[in-house]
Image (tube, grey):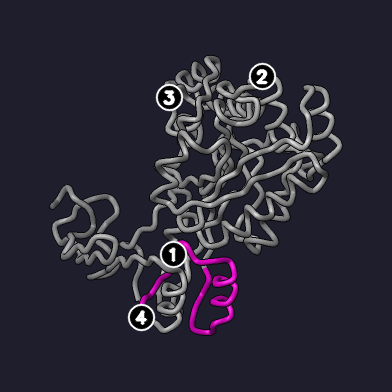
Amino acid sequence: KAFGGQYVIDSYNKNNLISFSANESYQGVLGPAANDKAAIKYYADANNLKLEVQEGKIDVAWRSLTPTDIEDLGNDENLVVHKGPGGELRYIVFNFDSMPYGAKTDDADEAKSLAVRQAAAHLVDREAIAKNVYKDTYTPAYSYVPQGFTGAIEPLKDLYGTDGKPDAAKAKKVLEDAGVETPVKLALQYNPDHYGPNSGDEYALVEKQLEADGLFDVDLKSTEWVTYQKQRVSDYPAYQLGWFPDYSDADNYLSPFFAKDNFLSNNYDNPEVDKLISEQRGMTDAAERTKAIEELQTMVAEDLSTLPLLQGAQVAIAGKDVKDVDKTLDASFKFRLGVLSK
């Protein structure tokens, strides 16, 4: 136990409740937990999570309350809304084989396929999605590495739209220059249960933005998560995904997405990108690695295998008697029970 964590597990009920007590033998750098006991309760329905933090049945609510819920709870005199830097990204994935003009379609054409992705990037209005759907609990994402990380830049703001705003004229031109007939028929899939109940509103707005000037004809559909996980690799030409980091480093937003045989399995393969991803992992000079991370973001922004939309903040709702919630809302993006007390 001396080499374990701050807690020992007293009981475990999968997808329901985990109970902990302080590990008295812990000798790690974090020091002893600030509380003797803690528990993590899982919720399938955000409404139940909201209700129980309102009623004081739980001390802290973290992920995934709706923006409206967060706004409502912020008006409760017994609760405090805590916000910290967020590492979550929400984005659209393109399958390079099955998207319009993809490698395995009847009218395969690499230049036209790229033009379709570029046109979509010119048309999406991230600010509108962040404000109207998420009440600014998310911010526009113009890159693949979230703001706040070493090396984060915003190449999509420079390459697409105008100063981050949608530009239909540019979208039309890129399609015309590539000889793409409009409207482009695009099958777009999203998931209604895994990424929060506002996903429906988010993708309804994306559909509206893409279709507004007659350049796209979007076939928008949703699928439950169990099926979605299985079908997204082979069946969806374009689809929603979200990402929470495994570790707090820019590489965790690059290697899993853009290295060859990445977890997306979307058939993207750029040898130059793959080479630079491998090289930056071994760089010991901070300035050299930062430059490589910046270069990678620009390279993948030009290829557009995924289209970043939003960067999420960390939000926790806690009772007024809960102390030090803000200490865990940092760039580690891990909620640490050991700093909390009442």
The residue type indicated by label 2 comes to Asp
Residue at point 56% right, 53% down?
Answer: 312
Is tag 2's residue or tag 1's residue first in the polypeptide sequence? 1
Assign a secondary structure to mark 2: loop
Q: Is residue 339 left or right of residue 131?
A: left
- Of the two numbered discs 2 and 1 in the rendering, the one whose residue sits closer to the viewer: 2
Q: Which of 193 and 161 is in front in this view?
A: 193
- Badge 3 is on which residue? 261
Q: How far apart are marks 3 and 2 (CA)?
A: 22 Å
- Badge 4 is on which residue? 57
Q: Distance between the residues labelled 1 and 4?
A: 14 Å
Is tag 3's residue or tag 2's residue first in the polypeptide sequence? 2
The residue type indicated by label 3 comes to Asp
Categorize mark 4 by other alpha carbons within 10 Å: few (<14), some (14-19), many (20+): few
Q: How far apart are marks 4 and 2 (CA)?
A: 57 Å
Q: In this view, does 88 lie to the left or right of 181?
A: left
Categorize mark 1 by other alpha carbons within 10 Å: few (<14), some (14-19), many (20+): some
Residue at point 33% right, 62% down?
Answer: 337
